[in-house]
Image (tube, helix red, strand yellow):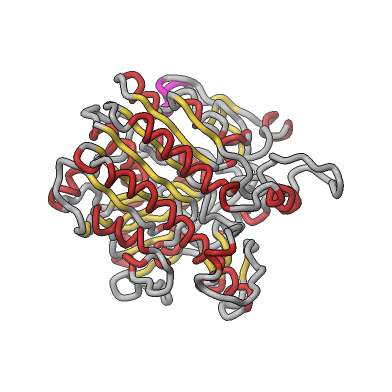
């Protein structure tokens, strides 16, 4: 048996043809939908990028205990588990967060990993002229783009090329897992001109949306959406190359395929650009998902069961006949493929230090914190933020938890560090107090799929609150989180 996962960053499902879009030119995503099962109620768990990747490997929620940070020494790691069972794993990625401090222990778990440089201000090419300070992503991005002219030099092209090289070398072999991870369509929307010309001949230079509120009909929104669609057409083209390889070598008969994303992105919807600072609206958390398993006939079908990112690791383990670990909260998706079986009555999702959110597939309840001081802590053995370690001030406040407080740490004491008020330094949009601005929100997705009007219904709110409480308990949420959210433990 073999398995391939193709993961994108910031892929908004509303822009994909199989989820109702009529503008994006994406013939290979249409083709993908014909060859796989398309999931209609797939959600994220923890946001944003690196928290989602921790869930991808461990099959359990990140945001209840920690902000952005490395894979912990006590974490169950999907590729490590595969290796212990004789399954080779290979990662090909241009996702620059893996070679920053806060994402530094994920790619090392694979049997081998190829890393493609240059995306979103990756500190790659050196140029002294114009330098004023470290961590200037916009300046570095401009420097990198000089080295990425010509489609053959684009990181997306290079990532796909490396993935195809692995497939060419190994498609005759058995017992391997290939993880192809693209940074696109994450901003900035740096894309070869031929893809832009699919949508316009006019100049549309705005390709790096700021994180903030925006007028929905602003010129920046129009240009951002156009450039986003151009990137979607590029990723579609290179998805087609992998599908072509699978066709040419008859890999559908013995290879599982998953295509997914870490989260969505807002491009002017409800007056927002980006993610992280607004409530967890559907555009961000309700994501596209495609799955093929050669032993289950389901090509071109839809699945309506409620599923999420924590289910991916158990599914890949199941593909190779390996049971999930005791600490994995996710469940294999293969029963969903077989008969659209319900595997979750409700699921949690959210950012560390912001709303705690729950959905049962129809209702979404976003609960705002009631207390902002003294009840938010990072539990970690590797205190690293995105670009640098926790500060001296943070570390001086560190406490040590009692051994066994959380079963998933496997009896290992961890550091308990008061949260600084941001899930990731160097980006002010992460301020966790923002959730108070919006308060509690309850939506009926059946009646209001675009979440235009929150509802007031005490009975439904209590029902969703009880589901939230049960899932927090199952996830071993720390005691102070109940206090912060005003929830009786």
Residue 224 placement: quadrant? bottom right
- Residue 154 vertical position relative to residue 279 in the rendered view, above or below: above
Tell whether position 205 is magenta: no
Does the magenta stretch mainly form a helix, a strand or a loop? loop
Q: Would you say 247 lies left or right of 443 here? A: left
Q: Give whichever of 315, 402 is nearer the camera.
A: 315
Tell whether position 409 is magenta: yes
- Residue 335 vertical position relative to residue 21 in the rendered view, above or below: above
Task: Name which residue lies at 54% across and 48% down.
Answer: 353
| Outermost residue to the bottom | 217
Q: Give whichever of 230, 448 is nearer the camera.
A: 230
Residue 313 placement: quadrant? top left
Task: Name which residue lies at 43% across and 66% down.
Answer: 441
Q: Would you say 373 lies left or right of 438 here? A: right
Task: Name which residue lies at 56% across and 66% down.
Answer: 227
Report x, y in % for residue 43: 36, 54
| Res 304 visible | yes
Report x, y in % for residue 147: 69, 47
* Magenta region, residue range: 403-410
| Res 63 visible | no
Q: Quadrant of the C terminus?
A: top left
């Amino acid at each position: 048996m073999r398995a391939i996962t193709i993961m994108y960053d910031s892929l908004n499902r509303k822009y994909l043809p199989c989820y109702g879009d009529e503008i994006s030119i994406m013939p290979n995503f249409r083709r993908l939908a014909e060859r796989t099962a398309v999931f209609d109620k797939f959600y994220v768990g923890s946001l944003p990028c690196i928290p989602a990747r921790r869930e991808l490997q461990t099959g359990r929620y990140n945001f209840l205990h920690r902000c952005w940070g490395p894979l912990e020494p006590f974490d169950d790691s999907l590729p490590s588990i595969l290796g212990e069972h004789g399954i080779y794993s290979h990662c090909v990625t241009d996702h620059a967060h893996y070679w920053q401090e806060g994402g530094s222990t994920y790619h090392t778990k694979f049997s081998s990993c190829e890393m493609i440089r240059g995306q979103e201000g990756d500190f790659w090419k050196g140029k002294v002229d114009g330098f004023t300070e470290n961590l200037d992503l916009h300046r570095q991005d401009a420097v990198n783009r000089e080295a990425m002219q010509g489609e053959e030099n684009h990181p997306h092209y290079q990532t796909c090329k490396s993935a195809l090289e692995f497939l060419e070398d190994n498609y005759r072999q058995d017992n391997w897992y290939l993880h192809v991870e693209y940074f696109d369509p994450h901003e900035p929307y740096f894309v070869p001109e031929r893809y832009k010309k699919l949508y316009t001949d006019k100049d549309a230079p705005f390709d790096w949306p700021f994180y903030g509120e925006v007028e929905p009909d602003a010129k920046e929104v129009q240009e951002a959406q156009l450039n986003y669609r151009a990137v979607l057409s590029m990723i579609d083209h290179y998805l087609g190359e992998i599908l072509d390889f699978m066709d040419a070598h008859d890999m559908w008969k013995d290879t599982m395929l998953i295509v997914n994303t870490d989260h969505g992105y807002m491009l002017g919807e409800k007056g927002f650009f980006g993610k992280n600072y607004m409530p967890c609206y559907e555009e961000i958390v309700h994501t596209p998902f495609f799955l093929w398993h050669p032993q289950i006939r389901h090509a071109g079908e839809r699945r309506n069961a409620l599923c999420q990112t924590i289910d991916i690791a158990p599914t890949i383990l199941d593909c190779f006949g390996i049971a999930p670990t005791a600490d994995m909260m996710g469940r294999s998706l293969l029963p969903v493929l077989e008969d659209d079986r319900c595997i979750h009555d409700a699921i949690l999702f959210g950012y560390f230090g912001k709303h705690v959110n729950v959905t049962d597939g129809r209702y979404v309840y976003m609960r705002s914190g009631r207390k902002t001081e003294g009840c938010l802590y990072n539990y970690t053995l590797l205190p690293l933020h995105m670009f640098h370690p926790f500060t001296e001030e943070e570390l001086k406040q560190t406490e040590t938890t009692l051994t066994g407080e959380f079963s998933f740490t496997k009896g290992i004491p961890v550091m308990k560090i008061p949260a600084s008020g941001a899930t990731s330094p160097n980006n002010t949009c992460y301020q966790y107090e923002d959730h108070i601005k919006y308060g509690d929100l309850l939506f009926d997705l059946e009646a209001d799929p675009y979440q235009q009007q929150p509802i007031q219904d005490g009975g439904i709110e209590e029902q969703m609150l009880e589901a939230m409480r049960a899932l927090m308990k199952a996830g071993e949420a720390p005691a102070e989180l109940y206090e912060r959210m005003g929830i009786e433990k």
